[in-house]
Amino acid sequence: MHVQKIALSVWGKTVRLELNKSSLKDLKQNYPGSITKSYIRDAFQECRSQTLELFDKIKLEAFYSQVHPDFSPIGWHLGHIAFTESLWLLERSAGKKCIFPEYRKLYAADGLPKSQRVKLPSIEETRYYLDVVREKVFDYLEVADIAAVEKIWFFLLQHECQHCETISIIWELIKTQSSNPIKISRQDISTSLPISPICQEMIKIPAGEFLMGSNEIDALDNEKSSYQVYLDTYFIDRYPVTCGNFRDFIQAEGYKNSQYWSDTGWTWLQSKQLKQPLYWHDDTAWDNHPVCGVSYYEAEAYGKFVGKRLPTEAEWEKAARWDVKSNRDRKYPWGEEKPTAEYCNCAGNIYKPQTTPVNAYPQGQSASGMYDALGNVWEWTSSWFDGYPGFEYYPYIGYSQVYFDGEHRVLKGGSWGTRIWAMRSSFRNWYHPHVREIFAGFRCVRD
Ligand code: AVJ
Ligand code: FE
């Protein structure tokens, strides 16, 4: 059952309660704000403690260096987290003056080009900035009229999650670049599961309507507003494509054979000389792990190789959230309970900074039997990133809308580097199709 722990102040005393979904709803209607405030405080604190764990891992060189032209240094992301919180909560919501105005130009999303984000404050100064902003933010939370600006808190929570996933990506890139002096050994990948190869079964999703998107409090602008979508019957892979599956493509000289590639994909490949995914392990012990570190073009080519194609985002989302038997919608593939270590491989549950076998989370499967819909790796879809009907940007046009440019593809599902507040079936991520540094894999569909 879905249970939420809350703390209420009753005549000056703190009372802790455990509530199920319906009693929580009653309370929310009668005492709006009080529950949300304690939820927000706890979530902000938990998320931040996961962020601070990153500080301990980061070596000095990694803090400042730009390991890839598409990614700002780790130190920038941390400062930008503090800046964004300060901008939207302290300045725009509380109406306070900007603290640390000297950081504005450096850390604003539209401030400096990525190549110029390398002259950064020290690790200690950055940590101090995060701490000071957070202290003032919690002071404000005490007095805030939460009903008026509730949504912005959920936006900021997810903003921190997304930048921390980017930090994990940078960290992974540093580990992958063999010439780099920072060597971090990979964790043991031992698993209790048998390593017989996963056969790529498909599951049938019957024709019908389902609800796409979300109107919940945590929905970002690009998830709104939810609407009914009808799809004909189709078949989708039960599991993400595994390394074992993908090895067939490599061994069949898939990277050398233009017949599997789209024209744009083939042109892109010619400039690269690739022979395997970015985070590839030439080791059969990884055979049941999902492929990780492929561009959209590589995913597309594999689909053609096996006579399938990539799903549209609607096809992906219906298989993940729709319970055909009861004709009901689920927030997560497994139901309404938040992501835990029982259900999926995401950041913060257990410290497992890598992929897991695609059959490791039977409890996390969707009503239709789709495994690993959330967690493990992001999954490329064939849909261009665009606004849903009635789209209105929030909180700024540059969050989603400027990427509705026909150049970004949608990814679904979250990865091992995604924190729970950004994990749900309606969540949408987007990148240029050539990007392979993110923790992305894919699964295929067939009509
Ligand atoms: C949606 C993950 C592509 O990190 O560039 C963070 C999210 N937007 N700050 C990114 C985002 C503004 C975005 N992605
Ligand atoms: Fe940002």
Image (cartoon, rainbow, N blue to C red):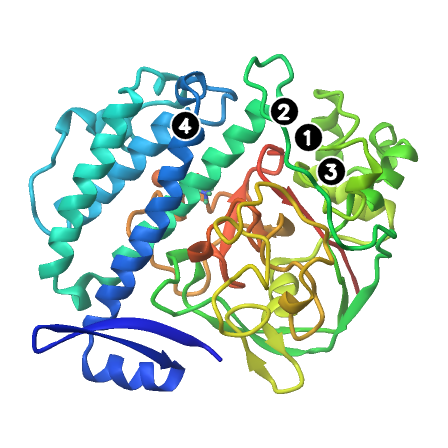
Of mark 3 and mark 4, the one earlier in the sequence is: 4
Q: Count residues near mark 2 (Cα–Cα under 10 Å), then give few for <14, some for 14-19, many for 20+.
A: some
Q: Count residues near mark 3 (Cα–Cα under 10 Å), then give few for <14, some for 14-19, many for 20+.
A: many
Lateral position of residue 42 relative to residue 69, left or right: left
- Cβ of mark 1 under 8 Å from ligand 1: the answer is no
Residue visible at 76% across and 62% down in the picture: 238
What residue sits right under mark 4 in the picture? 74
Distance (Cα) linking label 3 and label 1 = 11 Å
Q: Nearer the viewer, residue 51 or 167?
A: 51
Q: Count residues near mark 4 (Cα–Cα under 10 Å), then give few for <14, some for 14-19, many for 20+.
A: many
Please name the amino acid that badge 1 sits on.
Leu
Secondary structure category for the residue under label 3: helix
Please name the amino acid that badge 4 sits on.
Ile
Of mark 1 and mark 4, the one earlier in the sequence is: 4
Distance (Cα) linking label 3 and label 2 = 19 Å
Query: Mark 3–mark 2 contact, CB under 8 Å?
Result: no
Above or below, 408 against 363 in this view is above
Spot occupied by residue 199 in the image (x, y as percentages of width and height): 87, 57
Distance (Cα) linking label 2 and label 4 = 16 Å
Secondary structure category for the residue under label 1: loop
Residue visible at 62% across and 69% down in the picture: 318
What residue sits right under mark 2 in the picture? 176
Residue 20 appears anywhere in the view: yes
Spot occupied by residue 424 in the image (x, y as percentages of width and height): 50, 62
Of mark 2 and mark 1, the one earlier in the sequence is: 2
Above or below, 374 against 334 in this view is above
What residue sits right under mark 1 in the picture? 278
Please name the amino acid that badge 3 sits on.
Glu
